[in-house]
Amino acid sequence: REKLMRGLLIACAKRPITPEKIDGLITSIESELRSSQRNEIKSRDLGDLVLARLATLDDVAYIRFASVYKDFQNVEFSEALKELG
């Protein structure tokens, strides 16, 4: 939870997103994971859950998080921007 919070705070820096919204996003992800009753979750699956929520919250935070999470190269970054448009 703490590592995810740090990453989200960085992605959401200087954006109109309160720490409470970020905490709610993490709580929502935790609830979804608990209800799935999976013993393990891959970091890729967790990242996808975060991106799905960020996409509806803030485009800039989404791109920031995705650029680190997906380790974008120039062409991939351009494609991700097109997906948002």
Image (spheres, rainbow, N blue to C red):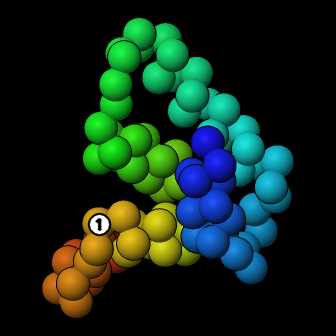
Rendered view: 5 above or below 15: above
Helix, strand or loop status at disc 1: loop
Instruction: Give the residue at x 41% y 10%.
Output: 37
x, y (%) of residue 67? 37, 74
- Residue at image position (36%, 64%) is 69
Q: Residue at x 29, y 38 (%)?
A: 42
For the question of whether residue 60 can be seen, the reply is yes
Numbered-mark total: 1
Q: Residue at the location (40% across, 41% down)?
A: 46
Which sits in the foreground, 25 or 42? 42
Q: Is residue 68 above or below residue 7?
A: below
Residue that sits furthest to the left in the current view: 75
Which residue type does callout 1 highlight?
Lys
- Determine if residue 8 is in view: no
Q: What residue is shown with label 1?
A: 70
Answer with left or right where residue 31 lies relative to residue 21: left
Side of 26 relative to 45 (left or right): right
Viewer-closest of 64 and 71: 71
Write down the quadrant of residue 18 in the picture. Answer: bottom right
Residue 61 placed where, x, y %? 56, 68
Looking at the rendering, in which quadrant would you find the N terminus?
A: top right
Q: Nearer the viewer, residue 19 or 15?
A: 19
Q: Estimate the x, y position of residue 36 in percent, counting from the top left.
A: 41, 13
Q: Residue furthest bottom?
A: 74
Horizontal side, residue 62 vs residue 28: left or right: left
| Image quarter (top left, top right, bottom left or bottom right) of the C terminus | bottom left
Answer with left or right where residue 78 lies relative to residue 36: left
Q: Decide: is 42 above or below 82.
A: above
The x, y position of residue 22, in whole percent, is 70, 50
Crowd rating for badge 1 (residues with CA inside 10 Å; few <14, some 14–19, many 20+): some
